[in-house]
């Protein structure tokens, strides 16, 4: 993967010429594409209306505008303090994804990232290559029965990310995604990083567990029971012992 940085009138764009040969600021807005559709999903998996599928088949992209969550997001929607191009959320995530994808990890391939500076603040956007046929874990367990092997494979896949030192800041039932072959992909690496082993590994597992319990609270018919979590952990620790 190649890296090209071009300055703009208000910031800069970072992109991979082997994926997108030329790019302008227009491409970071839905109206800059002939086709765009807002990402929707079940059980709030569509995010905050800040993510779009853009472009045409066979190569589509995912365009995401960075927005704040939590209490801060109620007052400041999408502005972040600027401390240099290399510290912007979009550039950091693009470069992390590039490194992971280059190591054949199941993450989206980064296409382009940009920031727009406004005084001491900036806004940011990211474009990745759309992975065909993946669905959020939340949707998979809403639409299908699951068995022990399914949950163990999820645990083993997460352990593979952890063994590689991949920290995901928001591992939940939406960012863990399943493809048509049952393989696990990980999306949305905002604030992600590569780290040495530590307590963060159990913390991210705990975050996923809380997410699963939360969506079952929204819809008790979902195919997730306490025993499924034990199966996931068994897959995780079996993979850890055999690594």
Image (cartoon, rainbow, N blue to C red):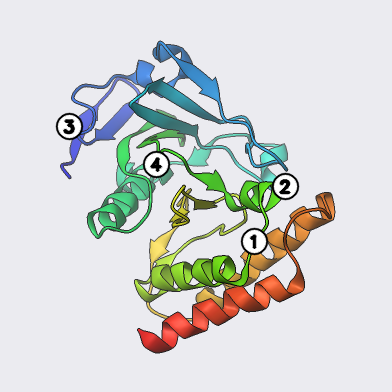
Sooner in the amino-acid sequence: mark 1 or mark 4: 4
Task: State the separation of the CA atoms marked 4 and 2.
Answer: 21 Å
Quadrant containing the C terminus is bottom left
Task: State the separation of the CA atoms marked 1 and 4.
Answer: 35 Å
Relative to 29, is 5 on the left or the right? left
Quadrant containing the N terminus is top left
Disc 2 or disc 3, which is closer to the eye? Answer: 3
Q: Is residue 199 visible?
A: no
The quarter of the displayed image where residue 3 is located = top left
Task: State the separation of the CA atoms marked 4 and 3.
Answer: 17 Å
- Residue 40: % across, % down: 62, 31
Q: How many marks?
A: 4
Q: Are marks 2 and 3 in contact (CB under 8 Å)?
A: no
* Residue denoted by label 1: 146
The quarter of the displayed image where residue 157 is located = bottom left
* Residue denoted by label 4: 90
Per the image, label 1 sits on a secondary structure element best described as loop
Q: Nearer the viewer, residue 28 or 84?
A: 28
- Residue 77: % across, % down: 62, 34
Q: Is residue 67 above or below residue 172?
A: above
Relative to 68, is 26 on the left or the right? left
Q: Residue at x 48, y 61 (%)?
A: 168
- Farthest residue to the bottom: give it: 241
* Residue denoted by label 3: 17
- Residue 149: % across, % down: 55, 70
Sooner in the amino-acid sequence: mark 2 or mark 3: 3
Per the image, label 2 sits on a secondary structure element best described as loop
Sooner in the amino-acid sequence: mark 1 or mark 3: 3
* Residue denoted by label 2: 71
């Amino acid at each position: 993967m190649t890296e090209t940085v071009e300055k703009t009138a208000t910031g800069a764009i970072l992109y991979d010429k082997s994926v997108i040969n030329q790019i302008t600021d227009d491409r970071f807005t839905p109206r800059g594409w002939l086709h765009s559709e807002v990402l929707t999903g079940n059980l709030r998996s569509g995010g905050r209306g800040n993510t779009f599928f853009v472009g045409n088949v066979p190569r589509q992209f995912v365009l995401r505008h960075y927005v704040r969550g939590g209490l801060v997001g109620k007052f400041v929607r999408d502005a972040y303090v600027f401390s240099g191009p290399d510290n912007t959320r979009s550039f950091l995530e693009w470069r992390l994804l590039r490194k992971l994808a280059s190591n054949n990890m199941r993450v989206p391939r980064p296409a382009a990232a940009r920031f727009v500076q406004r005084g001491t603040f900036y806004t940011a956007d990211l474009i990745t290559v759309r992975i065909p046929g993946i669905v959020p874990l939340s949707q998979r367990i809403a639409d299908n029965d699951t068995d022990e092997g399914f949950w163990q494979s999820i645990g083993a896949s997460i352990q593979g990310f952890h063994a590689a030192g991949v920290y995901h800041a928001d591992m939940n039932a939406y960012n863990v995604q399943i493809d048509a072959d049952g393989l696990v992909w990980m999306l949305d690496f905002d604030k992600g990083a590569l780290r040495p082993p530590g307590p963060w590994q159990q913390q991210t597992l705990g975050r996923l567990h809380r997410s699963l319990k939360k969506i079952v609270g929204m819809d008790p018919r979902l195919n997730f029971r306490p025993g499924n979590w034990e199966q996931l952990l068994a897959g995780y620790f079996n993979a850890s012992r055999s690594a």
